[in-house]
Amino acid sequence: QKEVEQNSGPLSVPEGAIASLNCTYSDRVSQSFFWYRQYSGKSPELIMSIYSNGDKEDGRFTAQLNKASQYVSLLIRDSQPSDSATYLCAVNGNTGNQFYFGTGTSLTVIP
Amino acid sequence: GAGVSQSPSNKVTEKGKDVELRCDPISGHTALYWYRQSLGQGLEFLIYFQGNSAPDKSGLPSDRFSAERTGGSVSTLTIQRTQQEDSAVYLCASSPHPETQYFGPGTRLLVL
């Protein structure tokens, strides 16, 4: 079983809609959770981090964490074509040093 | 300020040759990570350096892979006797603390 699982997509949403990206992880002791955005041919960039159960909002982005269900999600409100990218979920390992990344969900926002 | 830089940006080599990939982290960042990203795959952790502590090498896939970090700054990832399955993008990230990683542009390695 992979440490971090994501639906590879592709996920397509119309401009202005809400995009919902999901991630599950296997290590119950994980404490830190991250969402990275990776444009094609570019390196990942951090967009959200979350450490506690519940929601964390930053602009159009909301991260949701449920440690009991080992589930973390990212909602993108008012999706824009510029949001089209691959979104990587990352979870820290039990040593705190290692970060496990999912394979990413490809998002396309259709104008 | 300057971000993480990596060199070369692209490297084509023949099977069996050794390659060295370089990472210049952001000045002052004590943590440095190496990852590998194969086509359509997520990032695979390779190695982690934190200050002067012993590196966490648990992600290195074989003894052909090694890395060092000199003076707590520049890092070099060396792959000996390259194989075709080593073809990937090698990403370096640095961080002022383990939670926030800033990635370099990567080195695209192709082993023929």
Image: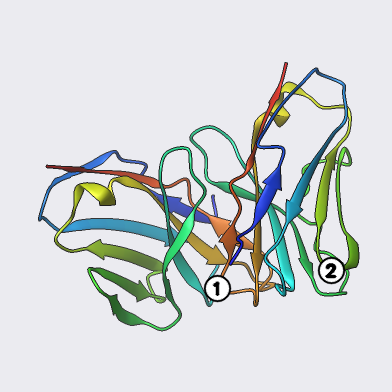
Marks 2 and 1: which is nearer the front?
2
User: Could you say where residue B8 lies in the image, as x and y percent from the top left?
Assistant: 72, 37
Q: Is residue A61 left or right of residue B11?
A: left
Q: Label 2: chain? A: B
Residue at point 37% right, 82% down? A53
| Few, some or many residues within 10 Å of mark 2 (<14, 14–19, 20+) | some
Q: Amino acid at mark 2?
A: Gly
Q: Which mark is residue A30?
A: 1
User: Could you say where residue A85 lies in the image, as x and y percent from the top left?
Assistant: 34, 46
Q: Secondary structure at mark 1?
A: loop
| Residue toward you, B91 or A29 | B91
Q: Is residue B27 left or right of residue A103?
A: right
| Few, some or many residues within 10 Å of mark 1 (<14, 14–19, 20+) | some
User: Could you say where residue A5 lies in the image, as x and y percent from the top left?
Assistant: 44, 52
Residue at point 81% right, 55% down? B75
| Residue toward you, A100 or A36 | A36
| Position of the C terminus of chain A by quadrant | top left
Q: Secondary structure at mark 2?
A: helix
Q: Please say whether residue A53 is visible from this viewpoint.
A: yes
* Looking at the image, residue A13 lies above or below residue A27: above
Q: Residue tagged by mark 2?
A: B72
User: Could you say where residue B106 lies in the image, as x and y percent from the top left?
Assistant: 62, 44
Which residue of the protein is positioned furthest toward the front in this rendering?
B1
Residue at point 67% right, 66% down? B26
Q: Which mark is residue A6?
A: none
Q: Is residue A14 left or right of residue B53?
A: left
How far apart are labels 2 and 1 at the CA level? 27 Å
Residue at point 47% right, 58% down? A45
Q: Please say whether residue B59 is visible from this viewpoint.
A: no
Q: Amino acid at mark 1?
A: Ser
Q: Label 1: chain? A: A
Place residue A65 in its image quadrant.
bottom left
